[in-house]
């Protein structure tokens, strides 16, 4: 049976870079050649979520949300628009498997560590996993805390903590949350977009990718979601979905 | 008039949206809209590169709606095979060839605008209360700017037209905003080309 992957993202009517990570992961998956077909779909761009399956020729398609958090989009919008009835659905004669957002997968923890090391961390610092968070939706924090737990379990950093952009514990309090003098902060975001590239550096008053404060130092990494290794995480997710 | 899929199989020239496609040796030549006497720029047929190329109009504005009739002009790309051509067309008009072929075959699932608006939730739920008159006007405003033919609105297919089976997210966003305008009309504003294509909350759109 032919196997396909459909990466779904939010997309945007205003920001052309919003969908870039989805396209990049799709390209990497095609290059790796494990699937007969790799396609994309978006909430705010085309092909739309509602019609993305129209283009799939594979008989067995795994839908993977290129999103960090489970919540309104993954539980309501995507299933409704794509006519999914559960984890495995029959849509227009195709078997459609619906995976969790990639932010839920334990293997993403290795990518978080990789981002920290790429930012210059040596493994002696505290690692802070930075999530968006929102007081409006308690589900949005769950995967951020889970990833913190997975990263801690890898044992590469002596201290691992969670901070958020829009809820407590706030990223600006990171030095108070850890013992280590040096901290590496890794944004658990899909894209190096407006938040990762602009609002967070501004709010943290970073000087380049760094902040020094009373003998302590913070290094700021790039977004986890743009890392090429995310394609490997998605492959694992699809392999797991195939066992359902 | 043959569909793009048939024309590719028969190696015949065809039009799809704003593209002119002609056989070119063993491959195909795809031309974007002409621009006076400007010679066309040669663009890569790589789907990712081509998608990026057509994501912006001549003035550099982002085009969130691939079917919008404001495609960048004066360019062409050469595809070495039918497979490369199909990938290029998919990059420029996602699902355009697929939907047009399904419409020709009578297998296209067409969803009316009323159904699309009725299923919206969250901040788009308000669009379900949009008046019938408003829906018709909104559809006309958006669809007149698009190369896709809204079969969901009863439109008849036309040469070069791309079958559209369901209202796009741009139209749904427009309906959401316009539903609010019905209750609280905004102050009139002169059209401003600097405002984003789907930036409906900004006066001058």
Image (cartoon, rainbow, N blue to C red):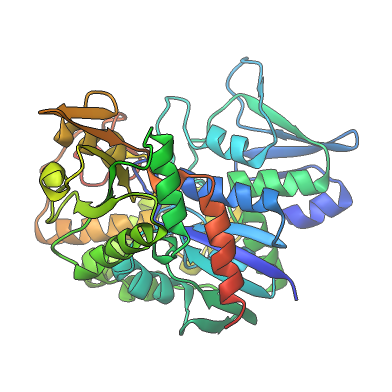
Residue at 63% across / 15% down in the picture?
A: B37
| Residue A172, image quadrant | top left
Q: Position of residue A7 (x, y in %)?
A: 52, 60
Compared with residue B195, is residue A36 higher up or lower down, i.e. above or below? below
Is residue B111 shown left or right of residue A72? right
Count the labels in the image: 0
Q: Position of residue B4 (x, y in %)?
A: 73, 52
Asked if residue B131 shows in the view, the reply is: no
Of A104 and B181, nearer the camera is: A104
Compared with residue B121, is residue A130 higher up or lower down, i.e. above or below? above
Residue at 30% across / 55% down in the picture?
A: B174
Residue at 55% across / 76% down in the picture?
A: A97
Q: Position of residue B169 (x, y in %)?
A: 39, 58
Compared with residue B22, is residue B119 higher up or lower down, i.e. above or below? below
Residue at the farthest right position: B26
| Residue A35, image quadrant | bottom right
Check the picture and name the quadrant holding the C terminus of chain A.
bottom right
Check the picture and name the quadrant holding the N terminus of chain A.
bottom right
Q: Position of residue A215 (x, y in %)?
A: 14, 28
Residue at 39% across / 50% down in the picture?
A: A156
Asked if residue B196 shows in the view, the reply is: yes
| Residue B126, image quadrant | bottom left
């Amino acid at each position: 049976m032919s196997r396909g992957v459909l990466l779904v993202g939010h997309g945007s009517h205003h920001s052309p870079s919003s969908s870039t990570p989805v396209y990049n992961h799709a390209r990497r998956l095609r290059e790796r050649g494990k699937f007969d077909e790799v396609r994309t779909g978006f909430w705010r761009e085309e092909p739309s979520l509602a019609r993305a399956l129209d283009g799939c020729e594979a008989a067995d398609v795994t839908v993977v949300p290129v999103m960090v958090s489970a919540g309104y989009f993954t539980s309501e919008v995507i299933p409704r628009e794509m006519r999914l009835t559960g984890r495995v659905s029959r849509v227009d004669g195709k078997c459609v498997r619906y995976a969790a957002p990639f932010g839920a997968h334990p293997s993403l923890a290795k990518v978080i560590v990789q981002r920290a090391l790429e930012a210059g961390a040596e493994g002696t610092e505290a690692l802070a996993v930075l999530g968006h968070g929102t007081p409006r939706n308690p589900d949005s924090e769950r995967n951020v805390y889970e990833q913190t737990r997975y990263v801690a379990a890898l044992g590469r950093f002596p201290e691992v903590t969670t901070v958020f952009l829009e809820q407590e514990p706030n990223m600006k309090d990171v030095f108070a949350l850890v013992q280590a003098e040096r901290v590496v902060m890794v944004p658990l975001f899909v894209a190096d977009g407006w938040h990762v590239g602009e609002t967070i550096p501004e709010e943290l008053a970073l000087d380049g990718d760094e902040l020094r404060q009373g003998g302590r130092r913070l290094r700021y990494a790039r977004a986890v979601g743009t890392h090429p290794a995310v394609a490997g995480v998605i492959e694992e997710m699809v392999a797991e979905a195939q066992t359902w | 008039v043959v569909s793009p899929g048939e024309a590719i199989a028969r190696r015949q020239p065809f039009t799809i949206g704003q593209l002119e496609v002609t056989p070119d040796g063993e491959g195909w030549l795809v031309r974007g809209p002409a621009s006076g006497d400007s010679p066309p720029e040669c663009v890569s047929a790589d789907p990712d590169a081509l998608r990026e190329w057509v994501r912006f109009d001549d003035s550099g504005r982002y085009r969130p709606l691939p079917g919008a009739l404001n495609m960048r002009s004066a360019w062409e790309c050469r595809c070495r095979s039918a497979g490369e051509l199909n990938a290029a067309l998919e990059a420029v008009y996602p699902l355009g060839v697929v939907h047009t072929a399904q419409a020709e075959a009578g297998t296209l699932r067409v969803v009316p605008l009323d159904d699309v608006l009725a299923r919206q939730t969250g901040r788009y739920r308000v669009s379900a209360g949009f008046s019938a008159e408003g829906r018709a006007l909104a559809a006309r405003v958006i669809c007149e700017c698009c190369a896709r033919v809204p079969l969901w609105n009863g439109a008849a297919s036309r040469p070069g037209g791309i079958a559209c089976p369901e209202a796009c997210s741009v139209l749904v966003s427009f309906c959401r905003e316009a539903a609010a305008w019905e209750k609280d009309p905004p102050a009139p504003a002169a059209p401003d080309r600097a405002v984003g294509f789907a930036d409906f909350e900004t006066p001058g759109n």
